[in-house]
Image (cartoon, rainbow, N blue to C red):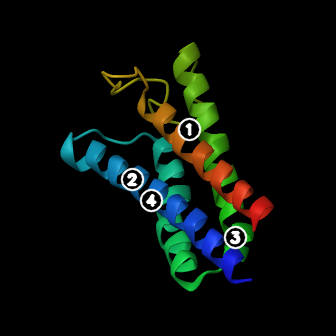
Amino acid sequence: MTGGRSAATAWLSAATAVATLATAGSLWFSLGLGLTPCDLCWYQRIAMYPLVVVLGVAAVEERPAVARTALPLVAVGLGLAVYHSYLQATLAECTVGGPCATVLWRSPLVGLSIPNLSLVAFGVLAVLLVGMRRRV
């Protein structure tokens, strides 16, 4: 049982690091670069921000069952990020409101937009949480 808990802590710690990096990145875009988040960005933030605390506490308390709580937030955020990335790729009109199809920033290294980075973060979180459930 101890080995399983240590493994769960490692998976949860990695997930906490991803959620923390994504949260810090979103704050850097708005506070550091002065970019105004669109509606879909706000919804993705609503799904990501609580994950820092939820996953962090679960890692400290060694509670792998938190995946039942975290996965719905990850699924919602992932779905929003997929839709947002699709809007930007097709330059379609946003049905949520705001300039969601507009690309405000693109990574100079890999060419990803902000919704693409959100998609990667939520995707990695999904892999970590599902992987943890299968291995612990």
Reading the chain from its start, which is encountered first: label 3 or label 2?
Answer: 2
For mark 3, what is the residue? 69
Instruction: Say how many tags the image has.
Output: 4
Mark carried by residue 17: 4
What residue did someone put label 1 on?
119
> Mark 1 or mark 3: which comes first in sequence?
3
- How far across and down, in percent of the image, does residue 85 sit? 56, 28
Q: Quadrant of residue 123?
A: top right
Percent coordinates x, y for residue 58 in the rendering: 58, 77
Q: In the figure, residue 133 lies in which quadrant?
A: bottom right
Residue displayed at 40% across by 22% down: 110
**Mark 3 or 2: the one toward you:** 2
In the picture as drawn, the residue positioned furthest to the top comes out as 90
Residue beneath disc 2: 21
Mark closer to the observer (3, 4): 4
Q: Amino acid at mark 4?
A: Ala
Left or right position of 77 against 25: right
Residue at far front of view: 3
Position of 100 relative to 58 (above/below): above
User: Residue 118 or 38: which is nearer the viewer?
Assistant: 118
User: In whole angstroms, how far apart are the C-alphas of marks 2 and 4?
Assistant: 6 Å
Q: Picture coordinates of residue 82 (x, y %)?
A: 63, 34
- Which of the 4 quarters of the picture holds residue 59? bottom right
Q: Residue at x 80, y 60 (%)?
A: 134
Q: Tag 1: Cα neighbours inside 10 Å, few (<14), some, or many (≥20)?
A: many
Q: What separation in Å lies between label 3 and label 4 (alpha carbons)? A: 17 Å
Which one is closest to the eye, mark 1 or mark 2? 2
